[in-house]
């Protein structure tokens, strides 16, 4: 069975991870080091583990807030429609 | 009573008593129990050799913390291989053609790996949802895509096993029906279909073993990511 030219510790269960490892190992394209990341990029980036974690949490937070706002708006709208139909 | 092609997949019952439990308990009766003897018989030695080889193969890339899963995954592998291959015998019921059973294996085990990852190394588990070096604009899109692919995993595990076995059994039934019908009218063609049936049966034996191995291998990969 042909082996991959890309050596990984963690199994590559997604295409995105494979592309990253190929860029790093076969083409030598590396991301910026932690010192070069300043400002908000220090906490939200796709290079450090903590940065990736914060991006994931922020995305889930935004999605959750959007869903909550949509549901509350829908509830208010249904409530207003119910009260308009009874009058 | 006219039988349809899918009657072979119905859960067996005898006078209203479901026999699925008996079908699931069959593998336990087929394998010898380890003894207290220093040197065991050939069958037991072969069985132990197989377990050792399999566990070494699967658990070599996994951290020590994940080796706790060795007994579970080895026994799952043996269970699935036995059910799959025993189901290839004529007129036997194959429990792994039932999606409910395969999902019953896939969902709890996958969920256990995810919960284990979130509990022991939450930063790693969450960080794994975003590939390194993703361009900024693509970050939210890729996070959503990786989350969807994470939740699709148990579905894929269960459906893969079900679909492979169901398709194989259906093909065997179709080709064997064709062979028996053609035997009287066109014997030469019946010989060809019988050859096809033989080759298909060999293929299905291989598929039965490979699918069980793939199921357990993928679970071990998900464990490796989270431990």
Image (cartoon, coloured by chain):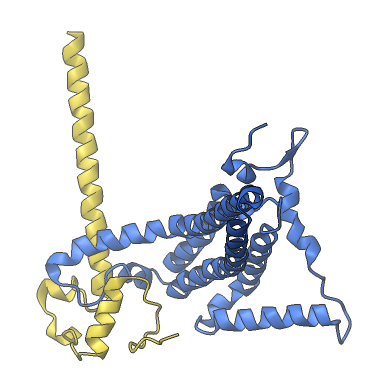
Chain colours: A yellow, B blue
Above or below: residue B83 compared with residue A5: above
Name which residue lies at 47% across and 73% down.
Answer: B221
Quadrant assignment for the N terminus of chain A: bottom left
Name which residue lies at 55% across and 57% down.
Answer: B168
Name which residue lies at 22% across and 66% down.
Answer: A55
Residue B20 position within the rendered picture, expressed as x and y whole percent measured from the top left: 70, 46
Instruction: Determine the image quadrant of residue B80.
Output: bottom right
Residue B34 position within the rendered picture, expressed as x and y whole percent measured from the top left: 82, 75
Q: Is residue B194 left or right of residue A49?
A: right
Q: Is residue B25 left or right of residue B204?
A: right
Judge by depth and name the residue closer to the eye, B118 or B53.
Answer: B53
Above or below: residue A27 compared with residue B197: below
Name which residue lies at 34% across and 61% down.
Answer: B149
- Residue lying farthest right? B37
Above or below: residue A1 compared with residue A72: below
Residue B156 position within the rendered picture, expressed as x and y whole percent measured from the top left: 44, 58
Quadrant assignment for the C terminus of chain A: top left
- Residue lying farthest top? A87
Above or below: residue B162 compared with residue B77: above
Residue B184 position within the rendered picture, expressed as x and y whole percent measured from the top left: 66, 49
Q: How many marks?
A: 0
Judge by depth and name the residue closer to the eye, B50 or B91.
Answer: B91
- Residue lying farthest left? A39
Judge by depth and name the residue closer to the eye, B193 or B34.
Answer: B193
Judge by depth and name the residue closer to the eye, B202 or A4.
Answer: B202
């Amino acid at each position: 069975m042909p082996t991959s030219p890309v050596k990984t510790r963690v199994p590559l269960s997604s295409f995105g991870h494979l592309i990253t490892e190929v860029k790093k190992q076969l083409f030598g394209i590396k991301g910026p080091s932690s010192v070069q990341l300043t400002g908000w990029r220090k906490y939200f980036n796709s290079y450090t583990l903590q940065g990736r974690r914060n991006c994931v949490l922020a995305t889930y937070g935004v999605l959750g807030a959007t869903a909550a706002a949509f549901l509350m708006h829908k509830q208010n709208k249904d409530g207003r429609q119910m009260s308009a139909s009874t009058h | 009573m006219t039988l349809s092609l899918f009657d072979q997949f119905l859960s067996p019952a005898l006078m209203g008593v479901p026999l699925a439990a008996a079908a699931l308990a069959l593998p336990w009766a087929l394998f010898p129990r380890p003894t207290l003897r220093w040197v065991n018989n050939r069958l037991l030695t072969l069985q132990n050799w197989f377990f050792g080889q399999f566990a070494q193969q699967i658990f070599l890339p996994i951290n020590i913390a994940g080796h706790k899963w060795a007994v579970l995954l080895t026994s799952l592998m043996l269970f699935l291989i036995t059910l799959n291959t025993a189901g290839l015998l004529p007129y036997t019921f194959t429990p792994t053609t039932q999606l409910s059973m395969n999902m019953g294996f896939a969902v709890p085990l996958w969920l256990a790996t995810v919960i284990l990852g979130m509990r022991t190394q939450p930063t790693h588990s969450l960080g794994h949802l975003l590939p390194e070096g993703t361009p900024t604009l693509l970050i939210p899109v890729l996070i959503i895509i990786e989350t969807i692919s994470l939740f699709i995993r148990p579905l894929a595990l269960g459906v893969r096993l079900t679909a492979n076995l169901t398709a194989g059994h259906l093909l065997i039934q179709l080709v064997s029906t064709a062979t028996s019908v053609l035997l009287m009218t066109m014997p030469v063609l019946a010989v060809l279909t019988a050859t096809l049936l033989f080759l298909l049966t060999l293929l299905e034996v291989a598929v039965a073993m490979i699918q069980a191995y793939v199921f357990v291998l993928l679970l071990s990969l998900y464990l490796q990511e989270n431990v």
